[in-house]
Image (tube, coloured by chain):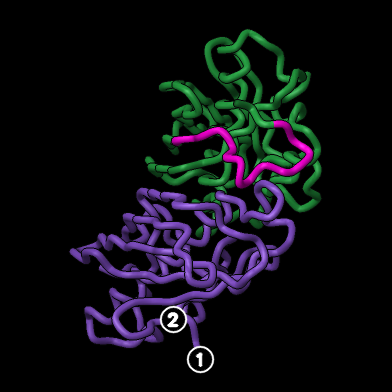
Chain colours: A green, B purple
Amino acid sequence: MKAIQDYYPDDLARCFGCGRLNEHGHHIRSFWVGEGTEARFTPQPYHTALPGFVNGGLLASLVDCHATGTAAAAAYRAEGREPDTLPPHRFVTASLRVDYLRPTPLGPELLLHGRVLSLSGRKVIVEVTISAGSETTVRGEVVTVEMPGSMRPASIPPTH
Amino acid sequence: MKAIQDYYPDDLARCFGCGRLNEHGHHIRSFWVGEGTEARFTPQPYHTALPGFVNGGLLASLVDCHATGTAAAAAYRAEGREPDTLPPHRFVTASLRVDYLRPTPLGPELLLHGRVLSLSGRKVIVEVTISAGSETTVRGEVVTVEMPGSMRPASIPPTH
């Protein structure tokens, strides 16, 4: 099964958080499931904060890239076209808010849920939660916008 | 010159963002300068978002650990004691807000400024900005709290 990030053209697939072509990255992969999105991520032992808990910066990074992936998936769906069609949707983050509801244990696989709160024009607002087992440990809200022209690689056609 | 993170006891110095003992981490180092704090960080080529720009998750991570370091430094100062005295201050993040004011270019060294917005009891709120050259590209606001007992390694005495 292909993740939304698997459809990103090569020049948009080098992100440290979610780029499949980034050798050093986190390789976050987001899937549309039901009415929202899911991603799974198992932190490495060195993704620690205090011993036994996951680093907050890493958790913010998971929220960030899962949100931009969710935004792209939602934008294709809103237009009734598949993510392998052109022009590609690729969202970047305008603002990120992350609430650490409780410490996230280091060890278990984490489950991310994404949900579109609003989609209008070039802006998509996404809620992302992170759960470890039955506990939701993180809630994020991310304002994403379609990649501006100033960031678009020359190989990529404009979306609008 | 020692960074605030250099004073963290070993069991509190393994953080992926700022732990000097984390082989795979970002090694963020924060210094008290004038009325606030500074840190410098040069992203690696693989810390990319879209080509030519720094990844937002990494920027959030820099904001996060520079804020908790600033909080610890401020807490020692408020008590009129040095950061090599016990018990150690170590703050964790309760919530993080990051506004990406403009794309952050990948290449130049980034300068982080931290400023304490409020300090009361176990909570310190910190503003962090990130600049590339003369441009401020990121503004963050971080609510940090003294490490709760549930996260404290057995080797570390309680702060209060």
Q: Secondary structure at mark 2?
A: strand
Which one is in front, B16 or B44?
A: B44
Residues marked 2 and 1 touching at CB (< 8 Å): yes
CA gap between label 2 and label 1 equals 9 Å
Q: Which residue is mark 2?
A: B31
Q: Which residue is mark 1?
A: B1
Q: Secondary structure at mark 1?
A: loop
Position above or below: A47 against B128? above
Q: x, y percentage for residue A93?
A: 51, 41
Q: Is residue A153 magenta?
A: yes
Q: Which residues are magenta?
A: A143-157
Q: x, y percentage for residue A131?
A: 51, 32
Residue A35 seen in the figure: yes
Q: Quadrant of residue A68?
A: top right
Tell which residue pokes out farthest to the left in this image.
Answer: B120
Q: Amino acid at mark 2?
A: Phe
Position above or below: A75 against B32? above
In the image, taking residue B155 as reference, residue B44 lies left or right, namely right
Q: x, y percentage for residue A61?
A: 56, 46
Q: Quadrant of the C terminus of chain A?
A: top right
Which one is in front, A154 or A74?
A: A154
Please give the name of the residue rendered at 49% of the width and 75% of the height, measured from the top-left corner. Answer: B39
Please give the name of the residue rendered at 34% of the width and 87% of the height, measured from the top-left corner. Answer: B82
Q: Is residue B92 magenta?
A: no
Q: Quadrant of the N terminus of chain A?
A: top right
Which one is in front, B109 or A42?
A: B109
- Disc ID at residue A142: none
In the image, taking residue A106 as reference, residue B91 lies left or right, namely left
Q: Amino acid at mark 1?
A: Met
